[in-house]
Image (cartoon, rainbow, N blue to C red):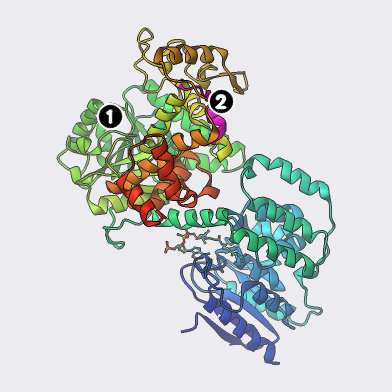
Amino acid sequence: MSVVRTERHDDILVIISDNPPVNALSAAVRQGLEAGIKEGVADDSIAAMVIRCDGKTFFAGADISEFGKPMQEPILPILVDMIEAAGKPVVAAVHGTALGGGCEVALASHYRIAVPSAKFGTPEVKLGILPGAGGTQRLPRVAGVELALEMTAKGTMIPANRARDAGLIDRLAGEDSLEKDAIAFAREISGIRPVPKSSEKPLTHDPAVFEQFRKANARRFRGYEAPEANIACVEKATQTPYEEGVQFERMQFMKLIMGVQSAAQRHIFFAERKASKIDDVPADIKLRPIKRVGVIGAGTMGGGITMNFLSAGIPVTIVEMQQEALDRGTAIMRKNYEATAAKGRITAEQVEQAMGLLKPTLDMNDLAECDLIIEAVYENMDVKKEVFGKLDKIAKPGAILASNTSFLDVNEIAASTSRPEDVLGMHFFSPANVMKLLEVVRGDKTAGDVLATVMALAKKIRKVAVVAGVCHGFIGNRMLEPRQVEAMKLLMEGATPEQIDKVHVDFGMPMGPFQMSDLAGVDIGWHRDPNRIENIRDALCAEERWGQKKKAGWYDYDDKRNPSPSPRVAEIIEEFRKKSGAAQHEVTTEEIIERTLYPMVNEGARILEEGKAQRASDIDVVWIYGYGWPPYRGGPMFWADTEGLKKIVAGLEKHGFKISALLKEKAEKGERFT
Ligand code: T1G
C-alpha cells in the first residue's frame, strides 16, 4: 500500500504522505511524492498542488535508517528540484516539525503555510552532516543568511511565527484547519506567474557576517567538522548561482556522510532512543500513574530534582527536617527559575506556575499522597536505610520509592522495606535540573512496571534515561574510577595535572580529570581530618585546596575562576613522588590515552559481561549525556570500535591491565561493541 495518496479538491490536488511515526522521507515516500507531482503537472484541470502529511508531523527529514545503504530513486536532491520545477504552484502545508529534508521539501515548494504550533529546522548538523537537498542554498535565500546560519550550523529549530516573520513561510493556518486553509491559499495564488522559486532569490555576500558567526561559535564548534561545512555552503550560496552552490553542497554532504563523525553522531541518535527500551519488559506494560512526586531533601540535589518535575507540570511535595533548610531550598528553586526567565527562556507566569506546584513541608507523613518518592539525603547507607524504613510505613501501597544514590547498593536499600519490588535508583547528575542523563538503577526485585513507569516519566521530564544494574558506581561513575586511579598514578610517574587535562580536552572532553575534580569539589568524599594525610588529595584538602569554590584546588583560580597551574600543588606532587619511589619517565599523550581512556572501555566491557547495562550503546549514551564525551566520537564503546578493539587490547596489555574476557573475545573475533 503506497504511503502517499492524492485527493482532488476541484482544481487543487492534495498530495498526502502517511508514513508513521514521523513521515521520514523514505524511498516509498519519495516515489509517492514524485508520482503525485507528476499527476498534478500532467492534469490541465489542476491549478495548483498542496503537499501535506497525516499523523503527528510534516516530514521530519530523510529516513536516517536508509543512510549507509544504496539510495533508491528518486534521491531527495532530485525530488526537491522537481517540485520547484513543476510548472504550477506547489504549496507545502506544515504541522508538527518540518525538519531536515522536510524543511527542504517545503523550501522547494513555491509557497509555505503552517499551523501556529509548527516548527522548522535543519538539524542535520547534529547528525554530523548538512541539509543535502538544496537546503543550504534555498534557506538563506528565503529566510536570510543569519537565520540560515543559526538553523544549519547550530541546528536551531524555530517556531512558525518566527518562520513567518523571517519569510520562511507565507501564511499561518488555523491550528485545526490546515488542509482547508492550504487549499484556499493554493486557489488564491494559483494564477500568479511566474511561480516563485526559492533558488532564484538573490543574495549578497558579506564576509563579515560569516567571520563574526565563526568567531562567536568557535568554542561550541570545537572538534566538529559539520558546522564549518554548513557555514561554507551557506557562504557559497551568497557567492554563486544555485546550480553551482548546490554542487558544492553535494560534495560537502558526501564528504561528511562518509566520515567517522557523522557515523558517530547517527549512532548516538539511535542509541539515545534505544536506551529507553527495556529488553525484558513488554513495551505495552501498564504503567503506574504518577500524579504527585515526593522529594526528601531540599539541598542542591533535592532542589534540582524537584525542578525537573515542576517544569513538566507535575506537583511536588518536598520534605526537609529544618524550616531554614526548606526555605533556603525553595528560595534557590525560585531564583533559578527567575534567572531563566531573565534570559527570556520562560515567562514570569511560567515561574509562578512551576512554583505553584511546589508543596514544602517538614512533615514526612505528607508524602503519603505521593505516587513516586525520591530521597536525596546524605550519601550514607545507614541514613538511606533509616529513611526507607520510615517511607515503608508512610507511602501508600503502589507508590514507587527511589533513591538518588550515586553508587550505594540499591538492593540493600530495598531490603530495608517490605516492598523491594517498588524500589529502584534514580541517579540524577548534578546540577540535576540541567544535566540530561538519568541512570535508572534496577534492583534485583524491582518490578517491570515500576521500571517502565520511571523510564517513561524520564522522557516526560526531558531526561535521557539509561537502565543500570546494581554495582559500585552503576555505569558512569564505575567507568570514571579507573580513569581517576590511572590519572593519579601518572602524576607519580612524572605527568602534571595540566598535561593530563589537556590530553582529555584536546580529545574533546569538556574538561580533564583534575579540572573536573576542582569543579565538583576536591573534598567530596574526603574524611575531613586535616591531620590524616595519606595521599595527594588529603594533602590538598588539608590546606583547604577544595577546588574552584575555594579558588584553589589542583589549580589556582583568579576572581573569574580562570585556572592556572599551582606551584604549591607541584611541590605537593613532588613530595609524594619521592615518597612513592615511583620511577619517573617522560609521559606521552599516547600513554595518557592508553592508561586513562582504554581502561574505561575495559570497565565498560565488564559492565556488559555482568549484565549491568543492557547494551554497549547505552554506555555511550551515559558518557555523552552524563560527562560530555564528544558526540562526534560516539561514546567510549563506539570510539573503541573505531580505534579497533585489537589496538585497545594491545594498549591495555602494554600497561599490564587485566583485560575483560568479553573485550578480548571481541578483539580476537574482529567484532565490534556497537
Ligand atoms: N529517520 C528515521 N527514523 C526517524 C527519524 C528520521 N529522520 N526521526 C525519528 N525517527 C524515528 C526514531 O528513531 C524513533 O524510532 C521514532 O521515529 C520516534 O522518534 C537530505 C540528510 C522528529 C523531533 O534529524 O528530531 O533530512 O525508537 O522518539 O521525541 O537534508 O525524532 O520509535 O523505533 O525522536 O516525538 C534530519 C530527527 C534527517 C530529525 C520527533 N532530520 N528526528 O521526536 O520521537 S537527515 C532529523 C527528531 C536529512 C536531508 C538530510 C525527532 C522528532 P523508534 P522520537 P519524538
Say which residue appears at 38% left-offset and 51% top-offset. Answer: 667
Task: Identify which amino acid the numbered label 2 is placed on.
Answer: Glu
The 10 Å Cα crowd at callout 1, few under 14, some 14 to 19, many 20 or more, is few
Residue with the mark numbered 1: 363
The 10 Å Cα crowd at callout 2, few under 14, some 14 to 19, many 20 or more, is some
The magenta stretch spans which residues?
A: 493-504
Let me know if residue 32 is in the magenta part: no
Residue 529 x, y percent position in the rendering:
35, 11
Residue with the mark numbered 2: 498
Q: How many marks?
A: 2
Q: Secondary structure at mark 1?
A: loop
Q: Quadrant of the C terminus?
A: bottom left
Q: Main secondary structure of the magenta part?
A: helix
Say which residue appears at 56% left-offset and 73% top-offset. Answer: 71
Say which residue appears at 55% left-offset and 79% top-offset. Answer: 16
Q: Nearer the viewer, residue 415 or 265?
A: 265
Residue 422 x, y percent position in the rendering:
22, 45
Q: Is residue 655 above or below residue 620?
A: above
| Residue 10 appears left or right of 644 | right
| Residue 29 appears left or right of 583 | right
Tell me how far mark 1 sits from mark 2, CA to CA: 48 Å
